[in-house]
Image: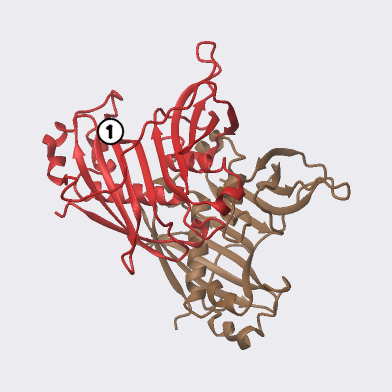
Chain colours: A brown, B red
Amino acid sequence: MEKIETYRFTVEPFHVDFTGHLFLGVLGNHLLNAAGRHSHNRGWGIDQLNEAHYTWVLSRLSIELTETPAQYEHVEVETWVESVMKLFTERNFLIRNADDGRVYGYARSIWAMIDTTTRQPSNLLEVKNGDILQYALTAEEKPCPIAKHGRIRLPAGAQPVRTVHTYYSDVDINGHINSVKYIEHILDLFPRRQFEQQRIRRFEIAYKIESYMGDELTLYCEPGADGSQIEIRKHVGSPEKPAGESIVLAKVIWE
Amino acid sequence: MEKIETYRFTVEPFHVDFTGHLFLGVLGNHLLNAAGRHSHNRGWGIDQLNEAHYTWVLSRLSIELTETPAQYEHVEVETWVESVMKLFTERNFLIRNADDGRVYGYARSIWAMIDTTTRQPSNLLEVKNGDILQYALTAEEKPCPIAKHGRIRLPAGAQPVRTVHTYYSDVDINGHINSVKYIEHILDLFPRRQFEQQRIRRFEIAYKIESYMGDELTLYCEPGADGSQIEIRKHVGSPEKPAGESIVLAKVIWE
């Protein structure tokens, strides 16, 4: 079995923004599909793991693009596993034009595996006798020339900029707010003018805890020298946690 | 050239709701893609029409399902033109399982063509010398056994139930709130319990006028004996139109 899986898609009319370029959330969705296909074809798909009471949990996703795919373009995503540690595995992506091969960019992701009965992290080197190791490619064998995930930390005293209610369309099959919807809510913080004048060069997101249909999400956004930092907190309204719990951290770097 | 075009898709993990069934908005997106492919392959695609200063405008969409496709199922959409009138054309869809052929349901849509320079409706029987007529199939040749679009009218005095702000992720390449996003906003009106206990048998939507990024949408919902009727009005805030303008009408029938 090849270590790299290639996944193809076309940039559909309803998947582009008003500038005619692919929504980053939709690209995220395609990357997750590519990851799912790669895992499934190697016996590590969520459907296969569920039977053994395991599931994958996405922890980090960083996408960096020198060009954003445009409407009707054919895109090819390569995905592979870069490393496997006890509690995390790194999965990378190359995103290129399927017709002329020009590279749009790369992405990096980090995943954990949890035991669905105990909700505790599982040792990836022990699940299926560490079978996943045979698919790993070193950074020398298959480079992913973008920076690893950075540290995202909002300054103390960051002010909330928007509250978002969550509904039916926000949640996935597990009843969790879906990873792609968070990306939409984050990009919706920026005004039209910004998308007209600039392009997102890099987008990073860290998923910390789950939120559920009906949760009220409070978004914090702090502009900084090297990009906007965003935090999404769940309003729990308890006296112990008046500011809620941190669900998602993200960073948007424009050019 | 065949009169019927077949379009295939797989029900992806991020495209199912918490019950594991395809979001109706995503199905709508696939139907519109199928329509786009059918038109394009016959010289009537939006990209081809744009050069001649014409474009398609979706006016009505009604979807009726006896079963909603579930996660990972392979779906096949057949689409064809049922009739062509001067100002409108009817396009139908059959939605079935690609593996065993069982029919999930059908959909009907109505489209107008407008001149992009004048924004006025065009005579479909004259554009390209009525070339579109050669692709039409009568209801006897290719049946679509669901009711035509009904009349949707909210009772006088219907009260607003939610106001939705529109952002970057809501708009399409033309800067209009996209047809699929309206479906999401409409279904988001219903509580989790309703989706747990019932299934949407029929969904109808009528697109009346465009709205744009930044518009504030006010949703009205009136339950009735044969389904909930929804209206989306654009808050224009002018003294002449204090209740705004009607953008979308919809009807949701549960079973």
- Quadrant of the rendered structure where residue B139 is? top left
Image vertical order of residue A227 relative to residue B12, above or below: above
At x 28% / y 33%, what residue is drawn?
B112
Please state the horizontal and vertical placement of residue B63, each as a whole percent of the image. 38, 46
Looking at the image, residue B31 sits to the left or right of residue A156; the answer is: left
Q: Nearer the viewer, residue A200 or A34?
A: A34
What secondary structure is marked by label 1?
strand
Count of number-bearing discs: 1
Question: Which residue in the protein does label 1 denote?
Answer: B112
Image vertical order of residue A255 relative to residue B77, above or below: above
Q: Nearer the viewer, residue A114 or A15?
A: A114
At x 61% / y 49%, what residue is drawn?
B192
Taking the view exactly as shown, the residue that stands out farthest to the right is A240
Observer able to see residue A205 = yes
Q: Residues within 10 Å of mark 1 (few under 14, many from 20)?
A: many
Please state the horizontal and vertical placement of residue A82, each as a whole percent of the image. 58, 75
Taking the view exactly as shown, the residue that stands out farthest to the front is B225
Image vertical order of residue B177 relative to residue B243, above or below: below
Looking at the image, residue A83 sits to the left or right of residue B145; the answer is: right
